[in-house]
Image (cartoon, rainbow, N blue to C red):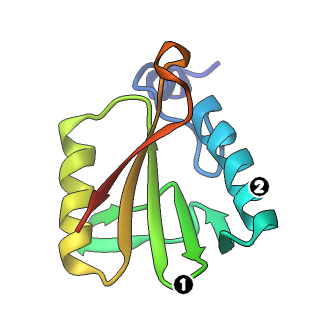
Amino acid sequence: MTAQRAALLALGRMKTGAMNKTEAAYERDLRDALNLGDILWFRFEGLKLRLADNTFYTPDFAVLAADRVMECHEVKGFWRDDARAKIKIAAEMYPFRFKAIQARAKRDGGGWAVEAFE
């Protein structure tokens, strides 16, 4: 493993286009929602939004809801301040629904906790 790759993994970042375990679990639920007609389409890292010069936000999932409103879903195990700031800024700038998705512990019933940014 190169030093650069080790540094990226130490920061908890995956290579662009690669999902972590939480994102992969959420993708399975999105596939189920697609099959049920609850959503119409989704894509992992399907959008890249410009927030400022040299500052971008790429939501984990771009989702077209059944009501035909575009949503940006950010899947997190935990939040860092910079990530929370970016999703708030993006929600102010773009006409999409922004949602933060966090896995709930099995002892708390499992599933997903959803926080909306409007």
Could you say which quadrant of the image residue 33 lies in? bottom right
Is 96 positioned to the left or the right of 43 in the image?
A: left
Is 35 positioned to the left or the right of 112 in the image?
A: right
Residue 42 or 20: which is nearer the viewer?
42
- Numbered badge on residue 67: 1
Which residue lies at the image location 40% right of the left edge and 25% below the top edge? 11
Where's residue 28, x and y in %?
Answer: 74, 46
Where's residue 64, x and y in %?
Answer: 58, 77
Is 27 positioned to the left or the right of 91 in the image?
A: right
Residue type highlighted by circle 2: Asp
Residue 108 or 13: which is nearer the viewer?
108
Q: Is residue 8 above or below residue 31?
A: above
Which residue lies at the image location 54% right of the left edge and 68% below the top edge? 62
> Can residue 38 be seen at all in this image of the molecule?
yes
Q: Quadrant of the C terminus?
A: bottom left
Q: Quadrant of the N terminus?
A: top right
Which residue lies at the image location 47% right of the left edge and 27% below the top edge? 104
| Dot 1: element | loop
Where's residue 25, x and y in %?
Answer: 67, 37
Residue that carries the numbered disc 2 in the rendered image: 32
- Numbered badge on residue 112: none
| Dot 2: element | helix
Q: Classify 10 Å Cα crowding around label 1: few (below 14), some (14-19), many (20 and above).
A: few
Could you say which quadrant of the image residue 80 lies in? top left
Where's residue 12, x and y in %?
Answer: 45, 27
Which residue lies at the image location 51% right of the left edge and 24% below the top edge? 9
Residue type highlighted by circle 1: Asp
View extreme (right): residue:
35
Q: Is residue 80 above or below residue 50?
A: above
View extreme (top): residue:
107
Is 98 positioned to the left or the right of 17 in the image?
A: left
> Can residue 53 be seen at all in this image of the molecule?
no
